[in-house]
Amino acid sequence: MGGQLSQPLSLYLMILFHDLSTTPDWQTRQWVCQIAKDLRQTDKDEIRATNPTLTIGDPDPEAILWMSIRYSKDAWVITKDDVAFCIFGAGPSGDPDLGTVWLLASTVLDTDRAAKKAVAKNTQPAVERWHQSWPKLANWIDIRNVMTLRWLTWAGFEIRDVDLEHGREKRPFYFIQKTKETPDV
């Protein structure tokens, strides 16, 4: 999709958003490794709960990050002082009117106020970009992943369904969705 989200929030914070469609592969690999090494426990738990390959061991965070990027039409990495702490995006689902949104982050997102503020500030522009491709945006979210649920409900997503036995581990998950607002005619 290409484009811009906000660039540095200020000169001293140096929080930058990088469009992965215009980023060299070597740089993306470096950022994926940085995030995978410090992936939030809630993201690891959610991946483990839904990943179909548990019979061969825990899912590899790097592999999951790469898979998320590859299946996305629009994916971004956020860095602070040249260190990646968050990766997010949206990609197609089986329904042409529905895009799947996702976000995976390091522990920096849970502890750094400037990082949280940057994500919050740029969420609405990202959602608007994704709504250019899909009138509905959604995903299943592990009920334990409170920070992601807060982020998405703050962005206007609503809980539309609950599956008490979702995924491989049969854990409770919420189906969250946001439908593009259309002007009244």
Image (spheres, grey):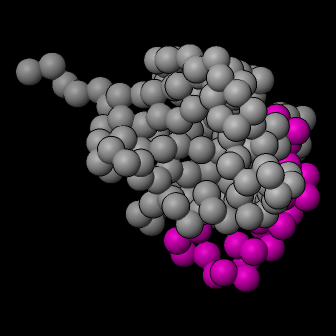
The location of residue 146, given as percent across then percent down, is 75, 23
* Residue located farthest toward the left when viewing the structure as drawn: 185
- Residue at horizontal 47 percent and vertical 34 percent from the top: 138
Quarter of the picture holding the N terminus: bottom left
Residue placed most toward the observer, 87 or 5 = 87
User: Whole-percent x and y of residue 25?
Assistant: 66, 81
Quadrant of res 56: bottom right
- Total of numbered circles in the picture? 0
- Residue 73 location in percent, x, y? 45, 60
Main secondary structure along the magenta-highlighted residues: helix
Q: Is residue 138 magenta?
A: no
Q: Which residues are magenta?
A: 19-42
User: Going by the image, does 68 lie left or right of 41?
Assistant: left
| Residue at 53% from the left image edge and 43% from the top image edge | 101
* Quarter the C terminus occupies: top left
Say which quarter of the image contains residue 15: bottom right
Q: Nearer the viewer, residue 110 or 93?
A: 93
| Magenta run includes residue 38 | yes
* Camera sees residue 93: yes
Does residue 92 appear left or right of residue 52 in this picture? left
Q: Residue at x 64, y 81 (%)?
A: 24
